[in-house]
Image (spheres, helix red, strand yellow):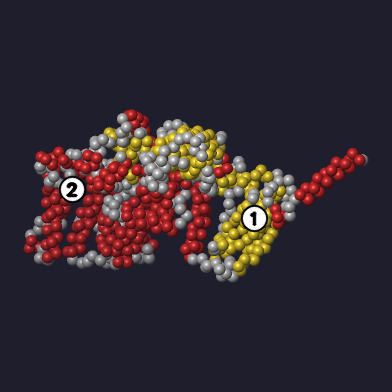
Amino acid sequence: MKRLLLPLFLLLSFFAHAEEALLPADKAFAFKAKVVNDNILLNWDIAQGYYLYKEKIKISSSSSTQLGVAKFPPAKIKNDEFFGKVGIYRKYVEVKIPVLEGDAKSLLLSVTFQGCADLGVCYPPITKSVALDISALKSPSLIDGALGIFSQAKQSAQSVVDKIKPISDEPLPADKAFNFSVNTFDADTLLVAWDIHPEYYLYHDKFFIDVKGADIGKVDFPKGKIKDDPLFGKVQIHKGRLELEVPLENIQTQNITFTAKYQGCWLGGICYPPQEKNVDLVLPIQSSSNTPSISLNSTGQNPVVTTNPTVELNETDQIAALLQQDNILWILASFFAFGLLLSLTPCVFPMIPILSGIIVGQKGEMTTKKALIMSIVFVLAMSVTYSIAGVLAGYFGENLQVLFQTPWVLVVFALIFVALAFSMFGYYEIQLPASLQNKIANMSNKQEGGHLISVAIMGFLSALIVGPCVAPPLAGALIYIGQTGDALLGGLSLFVMSLGMGAPLLLIGAGVSKLPKAGGWMDNVKYIFGILMFAVAIWLLDRIISDLVSLILWATLFSISPIAMGVLNKLGDTPNAWHRIFKAIGLLIMFYGILLWGLVARGGGDMLAPLSGWGANNTQESQVHIQFEKIKSVNDLDQVLGKSKKNNQLVMLDFYADWCISCKELERFVFANNEVVTAMKNVVSLQADVTKNDAIDKALMARFDIVGPPGILFFKNGIEDRSQRIVGEINAQGFIEHLNKVK
């Protein structure tokens, strides 16, 4: 009996001492609540040897004041003996709760939490009731509420997108799933980066970095997103691009070795073993210099050239970084401004005669209100299409607009414009069947002249076929979507940018409605828009026909159209002074067409300067152009870069496509400029024709995150200087200045 009582006595004695060693709950988890800057802050000072469960923190209020979503800091994952894998907090934790709305002067807050001691004893749930004075809080504005709603909608939409987004059949190699690089920021700072594929993520708590030859200072590690992981429960993860600035202290040598360890998973359900990378680096001597420093990536190949990223970021990367900011209103305002600037580019110009022709071609009285409604429908359809195409391109790396640049699509669309042009000249009227007209009229509340569905279709097709231009705002948004998977913010930014591009169209559409409808004046206006419709058709075919055939079509248009407009009629038939001015303009157009026929007879030439080739001295000058070496594949590029590296030559790579309007502008006005050709004399000039958009073209563009042409890259010592990349249009003088900067 004594043998049985002795162990029982010892066990009871242990629990008694353990209980005496335990702190009271209020000391183990010292809780406070206060109001700071329109937020309620809850904090716990957690004693050493104790921890608090994240999932057991519950917050409620019986007041009419509405609280926002509580913002919890990242928690550590613990395999708890009571609750399994859970998130816990140690030492200190602070939870921020925004106050959204309400007129109450005070707030009664109820907070429930639970924690444990490392000894193996857990406290029962603790509830604290706190009365807070919120009279000093400002009433939230409509904007604040809208931003809160947007944030919640963004999270909800993103979760849906993640669920429906298809996953690849096979996982990528670890180096491609988590593209790792480390470069010198300056003499005592490293820039470490992981470009994470959209279908993959890295664990926040699986990172380890070390430097041989120096000590590491304080690293500000960014917060990740919380994921309910099948292996580790609720954990912090990183997606898209992750960057770390690593300060170095007590540097013993310029030759250092950087070590990084990390681990991540594939959304398809496979996790990789821990990865370890060792990279040898040479620190620059002076930190004040902006001279690029060279370092090797994780594989020991393809060195990367970087400078201070706060100074040297190309425009596309700057825009991608803009989307990482928290100020949604600033982001959207910036993209709207980008759109206004893009409205001045050749990509938008063809949409002017399209929309104007639709409005002018309507029967009956066209009021400003009706014209404005039609313009809004056109722009909205264009914007929605542009946004959807952009999101798909960002997600899947496939530019939907490129698919619509195939010859048969362009021919069909050109024929549509030819048909519209003949209707402008009065040969026939294009209208829907009467039954369908009645249905459309009923759908639009019998609004005359609208045909809003057909207007929306034209806006949709215009966005896909007419304007496949790549500009820095578009490229930046697509890079952001591809890296982060944030379709909502990326798509919304593209939508707002498209609205900016279409804003001038609204003004033009409303202005066209002011033109007089009666008499011969209106017939002349229709003739002008008919010529413009023919011009759009030829402009589309320019992408798939030879220069000589294109020149013949333009010569035909400019020489025959004035005849159809009646410019050769007797002067007595045009007693009105305005009609005579109109006839004079038509004669000038005809004369220009005759000059173009002269170029056709010579076998070609510059239609913008039809007389430039008549002199012998100018003949040679007109043929000046950068002599590009054509490449097709990644292997072709690597061979040239290898040779240029040995010869210490600068290399320029131009991405070109026949359907790229901005590329044609570069060919004609930049690469054919005498000063540009002279400046490029000692530069190896490469050009990749990605018109076919086949697998080889896509692989070459994917290597450099090129969304589509135009894109101009510069290489030193076989390495691209990404900070000097040009995306979109640039004039000759701007190119020369940029080239001098690169050299």
Relative to the observer, which residue lies in front, 307 or 513?
A: 307
Instruction: Please name the residue shown 60% across and 55% down the image.
Output: 94
Q: CA distance from mark 2 to mark 1?
A: 74 Å
The foreground one among 207 and 612 is: 207
Classify 83 as above or below 448: above
Could you tell me residue 627's position as x and y percent? 24, 36
Secondary structure, mark 1, is strand
* Earlier residue among tags 2 and 1: 1
Residue 95, visible in the rendered structure: yes
Residue occupying the point 10% across, 43% down: 614
Q: Nearer the viewer, residue 219 or 33?
A: 219
Residue shown at 12% from the left, 66% from the top: 576
Q: Which residue is mark 1?
A: 44
Circle 2 SS class? loop
- What is the tally of numbered marks visible in this picture? 2
Q: Is residue 364 visible?
A: no
Q: Given the image, on which type of amino acid does mark 2 rest?
A: Leu
Question: What amino acid is at disc 1?
Answer: Trp
Nearer the observer: mark 2 or 1; the answer is 1
Q: Is residue 252 left or right of residue 728?
A: right
Residue 608 got which mark?
Answer: 2
Q: Residue at x 50, y 63 (%)?
A: 145
Tell me where residue 291 appears, x and y as whole percent: 37, 41
Q: Is residue 67 above or below residue 665?
A: below
Crowd class of label 1 (few under 14; some 14 to 19; many from 20; radius 10 Å): many
